[in-house]
Structure formats: structure tokens, C-alpha cells
Image (cartoon, coloured by chain):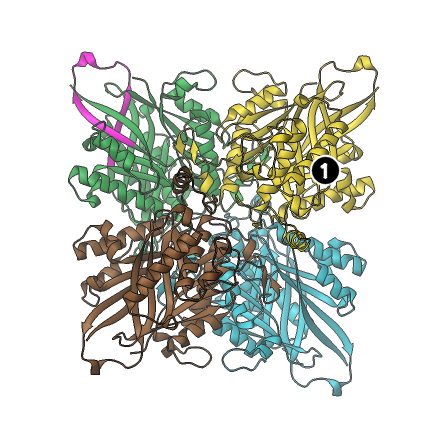
Chain colours: A green, B yellow, C cyan, D brown
């Protein structure tokens, strides 16, 4: 029987251009470059749209695989999803999580009975500028999510715990071209602000996930609910967008049997920026049993936590006024808060915490999605 | 028998100039303006040396008391210590903690047998520019700390859990004047950076506390240990400095019997920026009994947490590299991290978390001091 | 014959709370507090919406006049317009320009024949949240501008060189109240960004000026031209907005005869962020004759320059790409650029340069308004 | 006769990784890759020590040459000096200046009689951590400058107008190793602040230039004058430093005859941050004759301006207080001011303006060096 064996390894990076730990892992034979399906990481930098740290890391990571796969560095993204988030404010340690998937032939008797991590990956068709932040993007992303679920062998949405989408945003050029075609775009604001293209692009993708997983019925979706009706959301979507992308790329993490993985994934919801409960829920959902806080032995079994820290659209936190929403540097502070929140539970600063956008269809109103992967095998 | 009754109330501030909640408290009769000995608060702003939010809040708070005490607003600081820290990055909610101390005549039989919160306050003599960051400052601050201990009635250092010192720093003018007197100053760097006057001034004060409390023997102290020998520190000092101050002002929180307070203070040490254990230690030290994490009922008894989040002088956190030390915006990120750390335990964003300086004699190497006040009565 | 005598004096401020130079001027008798109609200044701080430096300076300036006018500090704004702009990035020296207007009885023969500076001032009626950035605001501001022109005795728009408007912006509360009344608002984005309320409020006011001065015909104005049709603009409007204001306040500077002022005002247009030509045009328009650059003797006659530096809505500057438009810190960089541009011509860092908003109806597309006041008497 | 023909071309960059304009220039045959001796550019990014934009541009520029020179990208720096400065705040347009030098055989009669641009290049021997900011570095850099002068054929210091030095700074590792060798370092502050290693490294290099050119006599130099005695300086040095460098690399621009270049270089001194006079002096020194301001025809002959904008060590500018020295974001504001100053004179935003350090031996006290290259042929 042919079965997935998914695994994850976390490598530190001493600079955005440092791939030495990753390369040692590949060269040691512990990880086979052919098996790597995704690199998900945090790079130091501003985390804003023009963050060169992210681009530099992307380039060097592609080179590390190009030489080992015998392909051109520009062709690596077809083989390996590169999901990098800039901005290591506070305690977030720069790193990359190496996600592998091998197919192994195994006798049925040797399979673990319980569901284990499986991974799916898919690309969407092209998404036009005029579709971003609207039904066009939502439907196209949803289709790609369904394809990724199929690729993973996941047929029950309840088994899906993390859906990462990296897709297109608007750019001066794509807006110009759309308008030349006689089309309008959802916003001409290219900032990372609350009315900007990045938020619309991320949120269109999030609703695409919600649609594919049945978290939101298609009938509830229209162009004008995007970034307006916050009751519509996905609890497992974490999305990012860049003006340079033409398609959406989807990476799905779920559990199913049979799977030969030693890992399990789970998810929770960070209800507000000081809610460690959401992080703990994700760990427990992934199969880590602990009472109040994970012990060092428990922490040693945590492979990675993937979280967003969305800036709430309110200035109230548990009845007190905070300034985060109205702070121009919220993009940085939110990551610092999110990183501290997660790492204070896991004990490891190499956490994948992105975010900083204000309000989102990623997670419930004023909340944020969090997924955890735990070694259970 | 004449006994202290110390209390604390926390008031939100809607802007740095908003004292309405505080004024309502005074006008309701719940708090008597005559009993207020200190206002300890967080104001929104940059938290850097030229943070006008702090100055504006200071002025408005003084006005609130001037009218009620029948004195000029410039004379309020003699009666009430104003310890304000700017910078509410992340989840820190702007607020002011109103610290009161009344003397009540009470029969011995009515006294609680166990030690409760007492408060002491003292001013130092003048500290010259050439003394800052050197033995002169250390000795003068130590003397004022001893006076404050006496004012509180505390004679055992083990009963002291929090010593706040607000004192002088260097300024262009004070340096010029010192040099005109033929004196040198410890640094001519007036930045908030690692070699700057603010760090020297804060650390001279911290060593003054350590000396007064016997945490460091006098024989171990010399000019050249300041900001060099990090093994010397106070676990209970939180200090701040401004070029406009001529004297140090000391506020001491400790426990003793007899005291009619319903509160108790305790302290812990935040060993690294993701160590919630230090916050929990402080809460337990103050008398809050809980197993792993405080429950909502436990949290309701927490009156306030006073913490610094010092930026470690290393780029390593639990064996992983972080960028905080080398980040120009560490002053903001450190507060965001510290606020999240404390509030995730207490459940309340109105936490008194300052800090952001790199390395300090406040707390052990790479650690930070934290004190907690809990309602036990 | 009763004639205006308008004057301006510039006072340095050593901190946002420092009014000593202004107070010395009042106490010396050189300036009569009763004659002061406006204080126009730059205060150090972020220049963002929550800049406490501006609020602190505002309070201290009001106090300086309250004691001298024998009124409450809260009543000073009825007598004196306070137009403060935060953010002294780069070379801008914190200062306040004291604008006075006295009425003197004089024989016709003694009057200078040529037009000289006159000043007008007016308040608008209330502007509702739903009117901001729309025709409601535009018409109400236009009416107030006309009243200020009348107050100044200016009846020809060609004589008007500078119209400052300080008016309301949206706030969470005013939006909530408008929506409770069943009204919509132009934007719910409260950021200082390109889609935010501050830009809409500033631009509605600018179009109000343009309407009153006939720079834009009423027929060309509709709700949906605001922040869309950049061909509509005022060359002399500089506007600011705050959520705390209910009315617009207008200060008009123009030239007319008879006037006993020793000053003259003029204006120009800064066509792009490196165009010193606009500054020179303003100086010449005010009556300063010079060939290429003003000499030190010419510079000594310059009283003040009032300019905005609007961030162009393009990334092209003279055919080269610049990053200003897409820079999150453009609000700071634009002021640094504008200050350097103006001060390099005038030789004086005490320049009134505000701005930093992206695109505006203040000045032509990608340009900025600039006015200059010169001593000619 | 074998004679130098030096030239310069400026290429825009659409992103730090965009080398398309440069590559088109090389591929068109207009510039021969073999002739390129230096790439001097501005890249967008923070301009702080961890600016990945600079590293990314460096890598892509090396690749552009590696393929054309048939060498490995890591070997390009031996052939081509890469002097990149991050931070395009305000109006500075990202670009790279391509500096070429060819040797041509020419009959004496065909030579221009007047001095024209010549270029020299040299590497120093290794500079140890303990030598940085001290006499060791000064002497080693001076030796390399002399070698570069020899390489250029310049034997009179008066003909030298610009000396760029890129050299080592301190790093945690180099400090650790130096201390393990029993050596001390000039500072352990690794920030970009006024007491930090970057300033010491830049200033040691500047004094090395001053020593080599005779601007400062050797007898005046001692370890303890560095960053203390500001009367010692070079008017033509612009230096940069990075912890990754082991050697200093020197690029010298001067004029001599015979030279076949169509260009001439000159220099001036920017006396304070609003002094356009220094920029004009540099242009005139390079041979551009104009009265007050260069006309568009004059501007068309300007090839490039190389300037620093040093933050003055005083808060006074022409008798007025400015906040630049004490502003944490001075590194950004100084570049915005410098860029506006230069581009307002040249009319071109593609200016090479770096700086932002506080006080320097680059340029006189409170001033900055500026060099200009003009087409005269």
C-alpha cells in the first residue's frame, strides 16, 4: 500500500541569506531534497511590502534546492512552496520549517491506526487584478484548496487544521492594466493599511478557504462582504499576498489514516492578543496531552506552531483600551505580541507567527488562527 | 496603635491628558487625595526621552491633585510621587495606579497577624552630573532607599519586594556645567542606547538599591563595575531617569506586620523574555496560591504587576538566535513582549511594564525584575 | 480712518511645553496679548494623530494667554487660532509664529499706497461626521472662508495668498453616532493613510477654500470628486483636521490697501519635492526682489514661510523612481524634505512646513502650496 | 602613450534585485564589463546594519558581472568595488553608478591638455578588531589610500577630490576573538549610535584618508583623538564599514593630465544641513561654471554627486534649535535632508547621498563632504 509519510524539521537562519543549517540537513541525508514540498519561514526584516530580507532568503533557499535537484533556481517554486514571512520583532527567532512528504510502500499491518499528518499542495489558475478581494478570487482559491485537499487525500473538512495560501495582490501595474481593460479594482490603496490591497488580497484568499472547507456557505458570499462582514471567516486559513504573484499556491495540513507520519496537526483560535488558551487548544488538538501548561517534556514534542496575530478592529481588550489598532507600527508590535504569546507556551522562539493586518477573515472577529504540529509517533 | 493602611487602585486613561477616571475616584470619596503617595502609570507615546505624552499626563495628574489639595500644581510632586513610563506598545493599556497610604489608629487585637503591604517614600540629596553612573550616585540613592525603608517601617530586606527610583540623568547642560567645574562625566552619549546616559543613570540607581538592601556588598562596588559586571544586581529595583531631575525619589513596597492593608506584595525574576514563570513567582510570592496558571477568580485578586522587560545583552534565547538586542526599535518591541507576557498571565492589559534598555543591574543578567500586588484581605 | 496693522513674530520653543520666548515677548510690551489672533507653529513629536507634543504645546500656549487676557485657558481658542503641526523631522526648528492684528486710527495721508498684509478669521458652523470629505463640508468651509475674507476686508481672490483651515475629522465616536442617525461616512478608515479620514477631512476643507476663492467652480464639485479628481485644487489652502473638532476655523492672509502692516504675503506652488522654485516664487510674490537666490540681506526680510509638502501620488520624480509614496514613514520623510527645501532657500530652520499626506487638493497634482510673508515696510 | 579613460554611467534600479538597466548597458556594448572598476549605489532599505536590500543588490550585481566576466560571483569583488549604501528616504532614487576605467594607447598630441578624471583602487592588508578606531586602522587605511593614489597616477593631494573607503567594523565574533587574544577593542557597543562600532570604524578610515593626503599630520594622531578631536578631518573621505569585512577597500577619484576622460571631479564641503553652497562648490570645483544656480543645461552635464550628510553633534543650526541630533530616526531624516539638498541643486534624484552618523572625521565639525563629477569633454 502506498502511503504518505509527512515530516517537518526546523532550521535556524543566522541571516536572511544563511541556509547553512538547512543545507547540512540535506547533505547529511536526514532530509531528501526530493521530498521537500514546502519551506515555511520567518526572516528578519520589516515585514512590509518592500522587505528585501524575504526576497533574499527566498533566493538563497531556491539556490540550495536548485543545486540539489539539478534544476534552475527559478524553477524551484514549482517543486517547493516557499512561504516566508518577514519581521522577527521581539522574540521570534529567524528560521525555516522544512516540510517533507515521501510516498512509501508499506504493508497495511504496519500502519498506525490513528490519523496522522498528511500534506496537500496545489496551484490555482490565474487570478486577475479585478478579481482580487472579490468573488473571482474567492472561487479560484476555493478550487485550489479543493485540489490541495485531494492531493492530501483529505475528504473531511474536520480533518483540516491549517491552510496556507500565498497569492497575488494588486500592484500599480496590475491596476493600470485592469483599468485599461475597462475593469475596476477593489481598492487603489496599495498600502498595508486597513483599506489597502494587501488586506483585501489576504482576505479574499481566506474566504476562499472558508468556502472550500464549508466554513462559510457560498450563498453568504458576495463582493461586498469582503472586509465588511466579519462573521464570515476561516478558522484555519493563514494567507499572504504579493504583487508579483499571478496564481495562488495552497498548502494544506490535515490528519488522516493511513499515514506513516510521526506527526499530527491541530488547531485552535487565539481569541484576543493575550489568549494563550488558543495556542494550548491547538497543541491539544494536535494530540499533546497536558493539564494547564506543557511541561519541558511536552514542549520537546512540539514541532512547530503556525499562527497569525491579527490586529483587532477594536481598541478594547478585555474591557480595557489598548492602542494597537491605531498604532502605525502595529505591524511590528502585533508580531512581537504574537511571538511572545506562542513562545511563552512552547518554550521555543522559533515560532512561525505572522500577521499585523487589522481585522481579517482569517480567524473569528478580533481573533487569529493558530495551528500546531506535534510529534506523536 | 497607629498603623499604615496602604491601598492601590488602577484607573484607565483615555488619552495622556485624560484624568477623568482618577478624578471620579477622588470625588466619589473612595480615595482621599490626602492619602495618595504615588501615581505609577503607563502613558501612550514613544517612551523615548522626548516623549510628550508622559509630560502631558504628568501635568494633568498634578492639576487633578493641586485643586483637591489646595496647592500649586508644581508643588504636587513633593506630596505625590509621579512615576510615569511612556510607550504602550502592543497590549499595554494606558492607566495609572493610585497608591495610597493612610495612618489609622487601631486596637492591637484588630490587626491582621500576618504581614501586609506597607509603603515608604523618600527623596535623596542632590546628585551631581559627575556622580551619575558612579559611586556618588550609588551611595546617595542607597541612602534614600534606607530612608524610604525607615519611612515604611521595614527593617528586614527580605520583606522588600519593589523599589522604584526616579532620578537624574545627564543633559547637555549638566555635562557642560560639570566639565566647567573640572569634572568628567561617565559618558557624553545622551542617546537611549547601550552606551548612553539613560542606561548609566538607571543602573547607578539600581546598584544603589542593591547596596541598601544588601544584595551587593559595598566592597564589590566601584565606578568601573557599572554596566560592566552584570553579576551585581538588584532583584527588586525598577528605575528611571530624566535630565530634568536633580534628586532621586524612592518608592518602596514591602510587607510587614502590623499593617492594616488588604494587599500584599511579592516579587519574582523574569529570567528571559518568554519566562512567564517569573510573573507567576511574583504572584505566588505576594500570596496568590494557584497551581499552574491563575484562574479568573485568582486574576480578580491581582491588583497590579510592576515589571521591567530588559533587553538581554545576548542574541541567544533558549539556544535560538533572536534579533531583539540589535534592533533599533527594541525599545518598543521589548515593551510589547513584556506586556504580552504579563497580561497573558494576569488577564488584564492594565499592566505596568516598562523597560527596553539593553542589559541592566535591574534584575539578573539577561533577566528582569517583576513585582506583584495581590488583594489578600 | 480705522485700519488694520498686521504683524508676525517668530518665537523658538525649547520643548513642546516651552513658552518662555513667547511670554517674554508679551511681557516686554513688544506684542500686546490682546492683538494676537493666531499662533501657528511646529512642535516636536511624531506628527501622527496621537501626537501629545502638539496637545501639550496647545495647552501651554493657551495658559500663556489665559493669564494675560484674564480668561480661562479653555476660552483662549475663541480669541486666538491655534494651528500647530507636529513633527520637526530633519532641520525644522520647533517654533511658534505669533500673528497679531491691531486696529489703528490713522490719517489717510499716512497710509502706504501699496497693498499690505491683512488678516481675517472666522469659524464655520458645525460640520457633521457624514458631511466630512463631502459637499456638506466643502460648502460649510467655503462659507467660513468667505466670512474670513470679509473679516480681512479682502474682496478680490487674487489678493488671497494663504488660507489655513483647521477642522473636524472622523473619530470612532462620531462615526458611531452618524451611523446611529442612519447616515453613512465617507470612510471608516481612521488611519493617516491614503484612504483614511484625515486625508478626506483635509481635502474637503481644501476644496471648500477652492470653492470660496473661485479656484474651482461649484458645478465641478460633487461628493465623488473628493480624493479622486486631482485637477481640482486650491493653490493657497493648507488644512488640518482632528477628531476633536466640531467646527472649522479659518485664518486668511492676503494683501490690501489700506493696511498699516509692514508685511506682505505671497504664494507659489512647489511643483515637486525638489522644486525650490516654488519657494522662491512665493518670496517674490510677497515682494522680495532677488535674482536667483535670496542674499543674506534678503533672507533677513523673510518673516515666515508656510508650506505643505504633499507626498506625490506617483513614484516618479523628474523621470526617476523614488520610494516616498510607498514608504510607511513618508509622513516623516516628507517633512524632512520639505523643511530642507524651504530652509535651504530662506536660511532659517524655523519654517512652518507640515504635510506628509499622500495626494491632496491642497496644491496641484503632485505639488504643494507655499506662502511667504516678507517685511517690506 | 598609455592613458586612462575613466567614465561613469548611472543606472536606475526598480528594486534592490533589479539589475536590468545595468545589464542592458553591458549588453549594448556601451560599457565593457572588463572596464568596470566600481559600482557605487543607493539601495532602498533601512540603511541600518541588517539591511538586506543592500545584501540582495550586492549579490545580484555580482551575478551580473560574474556571467559576463566568466568568474564566480564571489570573486567579482576582487575586480569590481561594490560600494552600496542603503536607505533611499525622501527623494533619493535607487540607482547604481557604474565606474569604468580603460587603458588606451594614444598619441600625445591627441590628449586634452587639462587634467581630467582618473581613478585608483587598492585593498589594504588585514585590519584586526583591536585596531579598529585606533592608530592601527588609521595607518593601514592610509597605506591603502597611498596605493590607490599610485594606481590612479595621482601624486598631488590637491588633485584628489573623493576617497571612498569600505572597511571592517566590529562584530560580536571579532570582539570575542580579540579579547581571547588578550586585546581590548575601542568599544563593545555594536549599535549604529554615537558610541557604536560603526562610527569608530568609519572615523578610523576617515583619519586614514586624512593622514595619507596630508590633511592631518601624523603627529596629531593618537588613539584617543578618534571621535574626540573633531578639528582633525578629511574633506574628501566618505567611508563605510561592515562587520563582515577583513580589509579596507579604497576607491580614489582625482584629476590629472594626461587622461582621456571626458569627466572631471571636484569637491566641496556642506557646512551644515541646509548649505547648498557646498554642493555648488563641488560642482564648480569639478569645472561646471554657473552663476548662482545651475541651469538645466548645466544640470545635464552633472554625472553624479557623492555626498554624506553627517548629523551635527550640536542641536543648533544657524542659531536655531533642531532635533536631528537627538532623534532616534536621524539615520533616516539625515538622508532625506541630504538627498533633498543635493537633488534640489542637481535636479536629479539619482544622487549618492549616504550618512546619518552623528559627528564624524568625514568633513569638518558639523559639516559633510561632497564630491561632484561633471562632463567637460
The x, y position of residue D340, in whole percent, is 46, 65
Quadrant of the rendered structure where residue D172 is? top left
Residue C230 seen in the current view:
no
Quadrant of the rendered structure where residue D252 is? bottom left
Residue A196 vs residue D75, the one in the foreground = D75
The x, y position of residue D251, in whole percent, is 33, 62
Mark 1: secondary structure: strand
From what the image shows, is residue D28 above or below residue C115?
Answer: above
- Is residue C60 rendered to the left or right of residue D201? right
The x, y position of residue B88, in whole percent, is 57, 40
- Is residue B109 rendered to the left or right of residue D222? right
- Residue most toward the front? D219
Residue D142 seen in the current view:
yes
Magenta residues: mostly which secondary structure? Answer: strand
> What's the residue at 52%, 43% (across, down)?
B194
Highlighted magenta segment, given as a residue range: A98-122
- Residue most toward the bottom? C109
Membership of C9 in magenta stretch = no
Residue D221 vs residue A306, the one in the foreground = D221
Mark 1 neighbour class, 10 Å CA radius: few under 14, some 14 to 19, many 20 or more: many
Count of all numbered marks drawn on residues in the image: 1
- Can you identify the residue that label 1 sits on? B81
> What's the residue at 44%, 23% (across, down)?
A280
Q: Quadrant of the C terminus of chain D?
A: bottom left
The x, y position of residue D271, in whole percent, is 51, 68
Membership of A100 in magenta stretch = yes
> What's the residue at 21%, 38% (across, down)?
A65
From what the image shows, is residue B154 above or below residue B170?
Answer: above
Q: Quadrant of the N terminus of chain D?
A: bottom left
Q: In which chain is the residue bearing label 1?
A: B
Amino acid at each position: 500500500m502506498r502511503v504518505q509519510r509527512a515530516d517537518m524539521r526546523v532550521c535556524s537562519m543566522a541571516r536572511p541569506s544563511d541556509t547553512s543549517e538547512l543545507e547540512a540537513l540535506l547533505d547529511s541525508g536526514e532530509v531528501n531534497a526530493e521530498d521537500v514540498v514546502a519551506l515555511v519561514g520567518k526572516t528578519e526584516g520589516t515585514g512590509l511590502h518592500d522587505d528585501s530580507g524575504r526576497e533574499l532568503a527566498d533566493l538563497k533557499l531556491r539556490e540550495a534546492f536548485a543545486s540539489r535537484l539539478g534544476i534552475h533556481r527559478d524553477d524551484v517554486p514549482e517543486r517547493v512552496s516557499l512561504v516566508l514571512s518577514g519581521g522577527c520583532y521581539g522574540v521570534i527567532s529567524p528560521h525555516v520549517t522544512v516540510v517533507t512528504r515521501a510516498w512509501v510502500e508499506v504493508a497495511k499491518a504496519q500502519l498506525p491506526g490513528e490519523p496522522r499528518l498528511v500534506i496537500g499542495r496545489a496551484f490555482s489558475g490565474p487570478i486577475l487584478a479585478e478579481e482580487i478581494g472579490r468573488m473571482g478570487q474567492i472561487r479560484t482559491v476555493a478550487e485550489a484548496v479543493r485540489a490541495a485537499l485531494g492531493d492530501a487525500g483529505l475528504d473531511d473538512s474536520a480533518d483540516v487544521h491549517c491552510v496556507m495560501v500565498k497569492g497575488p495582490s494588486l500592484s500599480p501595474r496590475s491596476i493600470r492594466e485592469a483599468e485599461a481593460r475597462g475593469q475596476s479594482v477593489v481598492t487603489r490603496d496599495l498600502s498595508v493599511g486597513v483599506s489597502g490591497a494587501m488586506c483585501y488580497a489576504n482576505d479574499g484568499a481566506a474566504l476562499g478557504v472558508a468556502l472550500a472547507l464549508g466554513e462559510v456557505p457560498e450563498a453568504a458570499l458576495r463582493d461586498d462582504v469582503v472586509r465588511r462582514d466579519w462573521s464570515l471567516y476561516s478558522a484555519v486559513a493563514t494567507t499572504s499576498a504579493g504583487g508579483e504573484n499571478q496564481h495562488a499556491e495552497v498548502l494544506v495540513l490535515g490528519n488522516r489514516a493511513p499515514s506513516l507520519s510521526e506527526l499530527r496537526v491541530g488547531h485552535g483560535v487565539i481569541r484576543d492578543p493575550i489568549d494563550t488558551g488558543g495556542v494550548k487548544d491547538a497543541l491539544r488538538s494536535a494530540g499533546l496531552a497536558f493539564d494547564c501548561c506543557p511541561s519541558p517534556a511536552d514542549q520537546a514534542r512540539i514541532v512547530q506552531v503556525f499562527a497569525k496575530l491579527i490586529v483587532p478592529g477594536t481598541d478594547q481588550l478585555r474591557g480595557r483600551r489598548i492602542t494597537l489598532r491605531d498604532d502605525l507600527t502595529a505591524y511590528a508590535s502585533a508580531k512581537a505580541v504574537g511571538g511572545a504569546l506562542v513562545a511563552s507556551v512552547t518554550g521555543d522562539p522559533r515560532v512561525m507567527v505572522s500577521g499585523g493586518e487589522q481585522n481579517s477573515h482569517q480567524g473569528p472577529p478580533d481573533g487569529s488562527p493558530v495551528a500546531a504540529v506535534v510529534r506523536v509517533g
